Image (cartoon, rainbow, N blue to C red):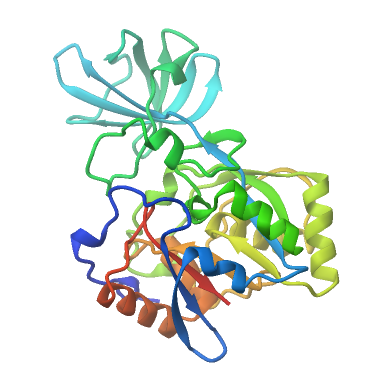
Amino acid sequence: MDLRLFDYKLPPELIAQYPLPRGSERLMILYRESGDIEHRKFRDIDRYLHEGDCLVVNDTKVIPARLTGKKKTGGKVELLLVKRLEDQEWECLVRTSKTPREGTEIYLDGGMRARVEGRQGDDVFRVRFSSPRVLDAGRIPLPPYIKRMPEQIDEQTYQTVYARHAGSVAAPTAGLHFTSSFLRGLEEKGVDIVYITLHVGPGTFAPVRSKKVEEHRMHSEDFFVSEHAAKRINTALSEGRRVIAVGTTTTRVIEHLLATESKIVSGKGSTDLFIYPGFKFRGIDAVLTNFHLPRSTLLMLVCAFGGYKLVMNAYSQAIERRYRFFSYGDAMLIL
């Protein structure tokens, strides 16, 4: 499958740089069977969620993973924390003018120091910090397409209202639209809201470089499903109730477990499941998602679920109607 099939031209001004108040965003509804498209506000989503629906959300929490500093030479350095290895040692993405060598010292803003201990892979390095309180020196890691520095507002708006378990370097953005009161209203209506965890890694922004989609390899991401959550999802599946995934992250966890275990099992795990057109979905009946980057694995997953022609047509309509794109943008519900 040619990567260029997932390309589209997006006017830069449609990339949302700041969030709207939760729930006031626009919502596009896609019907897979009929191909119909509706245009609503996000607050209207309760019209499409019914008693007995199992709404699965990702309760991961974004960590202040972005650190900045300088080398001895004065060259600027940006670190993105990826995974804690020990109290003072992390896997990090390192951005600098020249690839850092083992032993490179970095003087971080705020007084902390760091030392590059070795290379783990493409752009990923093992870095040791002078203090275990690394996160105290970090800031919220806004995506690269948000062309501004993180502000205090982002500490709240770039987290879902139900974020609990710290570990992500990017927000599960489909969940950013919900308020606590709206979720309570859904529960009162009889919607079963189930929380699972997948820690979003930097691979979510990794470009697909293979000309053939099938040759791309996903970065592995860690997840956790409680016994209570597994039981509730399995019950919904066995009773034929709709399972609605809030975001691509929950979609991947559910489909990974159904593909490998034939049911939702509790416990910790990791997944590098790559979903693109042709994938056979086993458990998801609807997906709530944002609008994603061209040529991204996220767009490919949405096309796999919604159908390539319908989704790409929806993106064309979104551009025509001036929808807001990406993390702080508008939403799409595929039924």
* 267 vs 272: above or below: above
Is 212 above or below relative to 57? below
In the picture provided, is 95 more to the left or to the right than 277?
Answer: left
- Give the tally of numbered discs: 0
Corner quadrant of residue 245: bottom right
In the picture, measured across the screen, residue 309 lies left or right of residue 164, that is left
For the C terminus, the quadrant is: bottom right
Q: Is residue 240 left or right of residue 108?
A: right
x, y percentage for residue 293? Answer: 34, 61
Residue at the image point whose x is 61% and y is 56% from the top? 250
Compared to residue 237, the image places residue 140 above or below, namely above
Question: Can see residue 275?
Answer: no
Quadrant in which the N terminus is drawn = bottom left
Q: Where residue 5 sits in the image (x, y, percent)?
A: 33, 77
Q: Position of residue 110 (x, y in %)?
A: 31, 11
Where in the figure is residue 48, as x and y percent of width and height? 61, 74
Q: Residue at x 57, y 74 (%)?
A: 279
Q: Please say if 321 is above or below 154.
A: below
Q: Residue at x 45, y 8 (%)?
A: 131
Query: In which quadrant of the rendered view does residue 24 lie?
Result: bottom left
